[in-house]
Image (tube, helix red, strand yellow):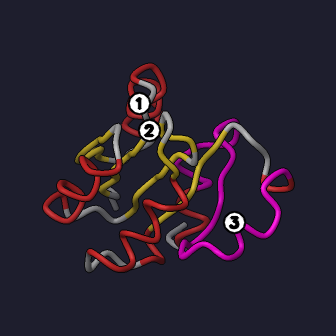
Amino acid sequence: MVLRCFIVDDSRHFLAAAQALLEREGFSVVGVASTTEEALRRVEEAEPDVVLVDLDLGGESGFELVRRFQHETTLDQSKVILISTYSEEDLGDLVSAAPVAAFLSKTHLSGRAIRRILGTC
């Protein structure tokens, strides 16, 4: 099954690398955004199966974005995965309190890891 993925990250380099990696692993990247407002405008129309949200959006907070997803969209929080170069241990209770399915370190990003989180492997 091809999963539809939407990626939110302010790094064009990371967006391109993640898109290439996930498409090689059988995902369809149906949208990308680099700001909170762009993500809020575009995510629902993309109808993703999973949304990857970077914690640091160039001065904006991925934590704030996922809270806004919860209150301003119909996006199911079980489809949202926080990603970061930081480890989950560095972020403490912030990740566990966020309305998301899970946290995934960018160094461990893979189609298999996403499918495991979503329970589709």
Q: State yes or no: residue 58 in magenta.
A: no
Q: Residues within 10 Å of mark 1 (few under 14, many from 20)?
A: some
Q: Amino acid at mark 1?
A: Leu
CA gap, disc 3 and disc 1: 22 Å
Contact, mark 3 vs mark 1 (Cβ under 8 Å): no
Q: In the rendering, at what x and y percent does residue 91 appear?
A: 78, 56
Sequence-earlier tag: 2 or 1 = 2
Q: Amino acid at mark 3?
A: Val
**What residue did someone put label 2 on?**
9
CA gap, disc 3 and disc 2: 17 Å
Q: Amino acid at mark 2?
A: Asp
Q: Residue at x 45, y 19 (%)?
A: 13
Mark whose residue sits in front, 2 or 1: 2
What number is the disc on residue 95? 3
Q: Residue furthest front?
A: 59
**What residue did someone put label 1 on?**
15
| Count of numbered labels shown in the rendering | 3
What secondary structure is marked by label 3?
helix
What is the magenta range? 90-113
Nearest the eye: 51 or 73: 73
Q: In the rendering, at what x and y percent does residue 42 appear?
A: 18, 54
What secondary structure is marked by label 1?
helix
Report whether 87 appears left or right of 40: right
Sequence-earlier tag: 3 or 2 = 2
Please determine whether, in this image, residue 1 is positioned above or below residue 34. below
Please determine whether, in this image, residue 39 is positioned above or below residue 98. above
What secondary structure is marked by label 2?
loop
Q: Residue at x 39, y 77 (%)?
A: 70
Report whether 52 appears left or right of 31: right
Q: In the rendering, at what x and y percent does residue 49 appear?
A: 34, 65
Contact, mark 2 vs mark 1 (Cβ under 8 Å): yes
